[in-house]
Image: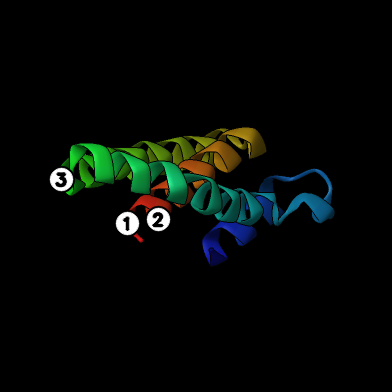
Amino acid sequence: MTVGGLAGLQIARDPQLATVPVAAMFLGTAGAMAPAAYLMTRFGRRLGFVLGGALGAFGGLFAAIGIWLGSLLFLSVGTFLVGAYAGSAQ
């Protein structure tokens, strides 16, 4: 979370947008909890955790690319996916 805010501050043109990646992470967590619980109930925990882990890996990759390119959008999408991972893990 700290890195998301600091990276957002460095990338964003407007300092008020610095916390967008952190907010995206919380939205990803909140949005993924119910679908992940349904998926795990219906198809098993193993599949749910594997898919959640894949979301986390892709999210980390998107966030890294966003930092490398200086793109707040990519960074925010990446942190949203990392948040979805966290929602599936909880």
Res. 67 visible in picture: yes
Residue 48 point in image, percent of width and height = 25, 43
Tell me the element at label 3: helix
Residues packed near mark 1 inside 10 Å, few (<14), some (14 to 19) or many (20 plus): some
Q: Amino acid at mark 3?
A: Arg
Q: Nearer the viewer, residue 70 or 26?
A: 26
Whether the residues at callouts 2 and 1 have beta carbons within 8 Å, the answer is yes
Instruction: Judge from the rendering whether residue 69 lies leftward or rightward of residue 40; answer left or right.
Output: right
Residue 72 point in image, percent of width and height = 65, 39
**Residue at the image position 83 percent from the left and 55 percent from the top:** 16
Q: Nearer the viewer, residue 55 or 49?
A: 49
Above-or-below relation of 27 to 42: below
Farthest bottom residue? 2
Residue with the mark numbered 2: 86
Q: Amino acid at mark 2?
A: Ala
Residue 1 point in image, percent of width and height = 53, 63
Residue with the mark numbered 3: 46
